[in-house]
Image (spheres, grey):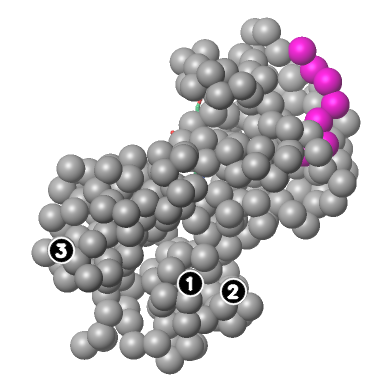
Amino acid sequence: MAKELFALFGNPVSHSKSPLMHNLSFQGLHYDACYTRYQLQDGEQLKNTFFSLGLKGINITVPHKEYAYNACDVLDPFAKKVGAVNTIVEKEGKLYGYNTDAPGFLKAISEFKGIKTVLFLGAGGTAQSTSSILRDGEYEVTLLNRSEGRLERYKQEGFETYTFENFIPKPYDLVINMTSAGLEDDSLPAPKEILDSVIPQAKACVDVIYGKETPFLKLAKSYNKPTKDGSDMLLYQGIIAFEYFTDHQFNFDEIEPHMKKAFIL
Ligand code: NDP
């Protein structure tokens, strides 16, 4: 039996690449551990389940990132600021919480140079941590969302926000699909007229959905824009989580070649 056990908590978890990503890295780096998946129905049971399974660490996916935040004894300052935890590590009986989605995302978009203004299509949970880290990095983030409700907290934090009804097109360097539109359907994240008004002026377009070409990315390609899906974000958040899981015994560059294999198998 492996010395340390890790898992992904979420609902659903069956299609996640995380077990493969982490197990390939444990194997490749000769670290005695194993990573599994656990479909957690009730987020309130996160802490009990963690300890009853004898885990060393977990990643948390939809819909439990806020429960994960509440379950932690110690929060990393960034996770505390954005209110979302996707990585937990147990040390001496205490749960330490981190957010690796946002730094993973920041690294993924940093390949596009000369970017200052960013338009987020969507304002859900992923937008919350990623908009915050981009703003810390001195990008200017504007949010455009289908409905008004989710924009409220961003308005209070001083972000420029629009719904489809009051959006005024202007040039944005990067346009990002932060919604789940296109994940399990063929919908665009915003009306086509709006996308046709911003994509041609953008330097690049990014989708956080991974493993498929969404209608949004197809449209961006039809305008000959450089594009990227969510695979790098997934890979990089995983590498950063692995650094925490192994208490920084391995650095990013050592982990990357092993974890990357999950994307070519
Ligand atoms: P949430 O449920 O928190 O938010 C969903 C957002 O999508 C809302 O802004 C919602 O708008 C909008 N939306 C949903 N459907 C449509 C539609 N048909 N048209 C327009 N807007 C729509 O989701 P998350 O923030 O947790 O996840 C967003 C995406 O990010 C998902 O596709 C997820 O797979 C991806 N993701 C990728 C990661 C990676 O590593 N690559 C990591 C984490 C997430 P409204 O407020 O109007 O409902």
Which quarter shows the C terminus?
Answer: bottom right
x 26%, y 53%: residue: 73
- Give x and y (percent) for residue 136: 65, 42
Residue indicated by mark 3: 51
Q: Does the image show residue 222?
A: no
Name the secondary structure under disc 2: helix
- Residues marked 1 and 3 touching at CB (< 8 Å): no
Tell me the amino acid under the disc marked 1: Glu
Q: Does the image show residue 46?
A: yes
The front one of 62 and 184 is 62
x 55%, y 36%: residue: 127
Residue indicated by mark 1: 243
Residue indicated by mark 2: 252
- Residues marked 2 and 1 touching at CB (< 8 Å): yes
Image position of 204 (left or right of 90): right
Q: Identify the main secondary structure in magenta.
A: loop
Sequence-first disc among 2 and 1? 1
Q: CA distance from mark 1 to mark 3?
A: 21 Å
Tell me the amino acid under the disc marked 2: Phe
Sequence-first disc among 1 and 3? 3
Name the secondary structure under disc 1: helix
- Above or below, 79 against 194 in this view is below
| Residue 172 in magenta stretch | yes
**Magenta-highlighted residues:** 168-174
